[in-house]
Image (cartoon, rainbow, N blue to C red):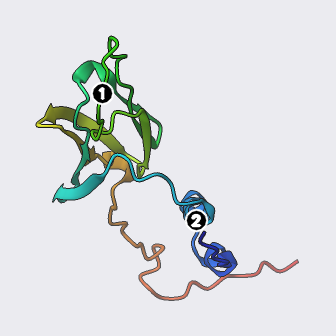
């Protein structure tokens, strides 16, 4: 069991608007290590493109579910019931699973493919144009850079 006690208060003072990210880091540090089934890879396939690949050998298309809700991607698997098969040895994992991935803002699932027991999920980060950085012109206030004299009216 991991026990980390980090104080993120100094970061909250200087990182404006990152509350969700800090809460995510805090909850990750406090959570128990979860089951590592099924194993997976996360790779960067482009500047704003990613791929999650899960090893789901033995699962068919109709036994897998893929759901994106807000900033969470949920991948689930439930084996269809076997019709009375009697195993002498069952080494291939066929247990149900549920794997959650936290996604950054503006990350969307663009496709999924099951091939050779590997489920590949393609993701892309699409930042709206109004959210992208933009250069802001700095004006001089119309005084040409010279201080403006303020006159006081006599009473």
In the rendered image, residue 39, in percent from the top left (x then y), is placed at 31, 51
Q: For the view shown, which residue lies furthest in the bottom direction? A: 146
- Which quadrant of the figure contains the N terminus? bottom right
Residue at image location 61% in from the left, 65% down from the top: 26
Q: For the view shown, which residue lies furthest in the left direction? A: 116
Disc 2 is placed on an element classified as: helix
Q: Report the residue marked by disc 1.
A: 87
In the rendered image, residue 56, in percent from the top left (x then y), is placed at 26, 38
CA gap, disc 2 and disc 1: 48 Å
Q: Nearer the viewer, mark 2 or mark 1?
A: 1
Residue at image location 40% in from the left, 53% down from the top: 36
In the rendered image, residue 93, in percent from the top left (x then y), is placed at 32, 39
Mark closer to the chain start, 2 or 1: 2
In terms of depth relative to the viewer, which is nearer, 105 or 145?
105
Q: Residue 25 vs residue 95: left or right?
A: right
Is 125 rendered above or below residue 18? above
In terms of depth relative to the viewer, which is nearer, 76 or 143?
76
Is 74 rendered above or below residue 64? below
In the rendered image, residue 76, in percent from the top left (x then y), is placed at 39, 32
User: For the residue carrying disc 2, how many other residues have a C-alpha within 10 Å: few (<14), some (14-19), or many (20+)?
Assistant: some
Q: Residue 150 vs residue 155: left or right?
A: left
Residue at image location 40% in from the left, 34% down from the top: 95
Q: For the view shown, which residue lies furthest in the top direction? A: 83
Is 72 rendered above or below residue 35? above
Where residue 22 is drawn, which disc sits there? 2
Residue at image location 34% in from the left, 33% down from the top: 94
Q: Quadrant of residue 110?
A: top left
Where residue 11 is drawn, which disc sits there? none
The reply to whether dot 2 and dot 1 touch (C-beta < 8 Å) is no
Q: Residue 132 vs residue 46: left or right?
A: right
User: For the residue carrying disc 1, how many other residues have a C-alpha within 10 Å: few (<14), some (14-19), or many (20+)?
Assistant: few
Disc 1 is placed on an element classified as: loop
């Amino acid at each position: 069991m991991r026990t980390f006690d980090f104080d993120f208060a100094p970061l909250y003072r200087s990182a404006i608007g990152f509350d969700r990210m800090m809460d995510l880091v805090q909850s990750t540090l406090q959570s128990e290590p979860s089951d590592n089934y099924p194993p997976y890879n996360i790779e960067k396939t482009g500047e704003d493109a990613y791929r999650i690949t899960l090893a789901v050998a033995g699962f068919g298309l109709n036994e897998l579910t893929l759901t994106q809700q807000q900033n969470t991607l949920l991948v689930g698997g439930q084996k269809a019931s076997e019709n009375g098969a009697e195993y002498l040895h069952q080494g291939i994992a066929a247990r149900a699973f549920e794997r959650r991935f936290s996604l950054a803002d503006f990350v969307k699932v663009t496709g999924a493919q099951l091939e050779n027991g590997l489920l590949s999920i393609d993701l892309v980060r699409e930042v709206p144009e109004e959210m992208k950085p933009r250069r802001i012109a700095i004006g001089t206030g119309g005084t040409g850079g010279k201080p403006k004299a303020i006159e006081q009216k006599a009473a």
